[in-house]
């Protein structure tokens, strides 16, 4: 009898402790600042005119096959033929990107939700041989992780307050790209593709700036000394400059060809 009573008391105490722990955890989550607030560390929001409204978007039921690469190494999406990145999401990550922290734990100012372990939705082979805490979920930006050993890209505050972040992809463009590559389609695809083309498409500002720099300095298309920041940025958008792309652009502009 005494033993049974002791067991019941122990179980009641355990339940009370568990309930107390839940209350404490809920209070911490409620008090937690969103990631953009933490990044600002008391400074003003990136947007001087106030936060812009996040774009509305919904995921569609249709699915598309994973794209393949053509002879030029470009990924071909049959439903969006003008969108031709040449790095798969796996290649972006394995080349060393985002200071090792793209899929870090965040609290989104757009959705109000906290996200942790977001990378786990993607194929495990994308992360094979990578150090997850250092190269995928690092809370600290690590220059040594990046391929070109430079820092580039804006903070989550910049993207959120400028109205670029959609609720369906709270981490931003690369999260959208990972899902798009795997076949997900949404009402946000055209906007995100337009952003990508503006950076690294045929008329992309970063891509063509880099080609121009290589031409003016008479250095090879793949010389890492020519604007490593732009190269790192392009990589984050799924693109690495190729000889073929550089040649086409220089011919169209009647500029000096690159050394080989």
Image (spheres, helix red, strand yellow):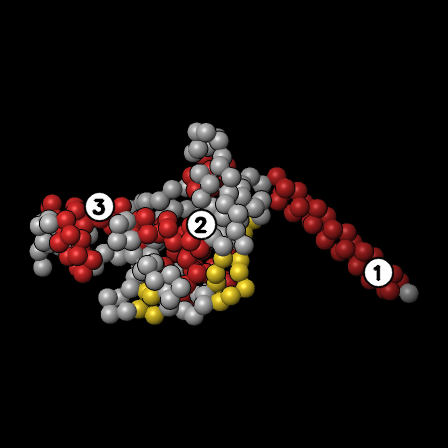
Please tell me which residue is depicted at 53% across the width and 43% down the height of the picture: 110
Q: Nearer the viewer, residue 198 or 144?
A: 198
Please tell me which residue is depicted at 43% across the width and 70% down the height of the picture: 65
Q: Nearer the viewer, residue 251 or 97?
A: 251
| Residue hosting label 2 | 172
Let me know if residue 136 appears in the view: no
Q: CA distance from mark 1 to mark 3?
A: 72 Å
Please tell me which residue is depicted at 54% across the width and 54% down the height of the picture: 58
Q: CA distance from mark 2 to mark 3?
A: 24 Å
Measured as percent of width and height from the top left, residue 185 is found at: 48, 61
| Residue hosting label 3 | 209
Is 128 displayed left or right of 54 in the figure? left
The residue carrying pointer 1 sits among few (fewer than 14), some (14 to 19) or many (20 or more) residues within 10 Å by Cα, namely few
Measured as percent of width and height from the top left, residue 178 is found at: 43, 60
Measured as percent of width and height from the top left, residue 243 is found at: 17, 59
| Residue hosting label 1 | 8
Please tell me which residue is depicted at 29% across the width and 52% down the height of the picture: 200
Q: How many marks?
A: 3
Let me know if residue 166 appears in the view: yes
Is 91 displayed left or right of 170 in the figure? left
Q: Mark 1 touching mark 3, by CB under 8 A?
A: no
Which picture quadrant has residue 31? top right
Of marks 2 and 3, which one's residue comes earlier in the chain?
2
């Amino acid at each position: 009898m005494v033993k049974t009573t002791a067991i019941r008391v122990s179980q009641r105490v355990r339940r009370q402790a568990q309930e107390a722990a839940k209350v404490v955890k809920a209070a911490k989550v409620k008090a937690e600042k969103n990631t953009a607030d933490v990044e600002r560390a008391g400074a003003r929001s990136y947007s001087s005119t106030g936060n812009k409204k996040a774009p509305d978007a919904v995921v569609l039921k249709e699915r598309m096959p994973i794209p393949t690469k053509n002879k030029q190494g470009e990924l071909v999406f049959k439903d969006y033929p003008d969108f031709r990145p040449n790095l798969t999401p796996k290649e972006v990550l394995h080349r060393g990107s985002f200071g090792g922290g793209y899929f870090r734990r965040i609290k989104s100012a757009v959705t109000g939700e906290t996200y942790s372990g977001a990378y786990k939705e993607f194929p495990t082979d994308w992360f094979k041989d990578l150090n997850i805490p250092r190269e995928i979920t690092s809370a600290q930006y690590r220059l040594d992780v990046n391929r070109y050993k430079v820092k580039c890209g804006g903070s989550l505050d910049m993207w959120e307050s400028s109205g670029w972040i959609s609720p369906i992809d709270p981490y931003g463009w690369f999260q959208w790209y990972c899902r798009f590559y795997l076949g997900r389609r949404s009402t946000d695809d055209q906007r995100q593709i337009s952003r990508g083309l503006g950076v690294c498409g045929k008329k992309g500002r970063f891509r063509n700036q880099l080609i121009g720099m290589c031409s003016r300095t008479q250095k090879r298309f793949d010389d890492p000394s020519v604007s490593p920041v732009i190269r790192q940025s392009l990589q984050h958008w799924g693109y690495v400059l190729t000889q073929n792309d550089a040649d086409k652009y220089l011919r169209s502009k009647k500029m000096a060809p690159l050394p080989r």
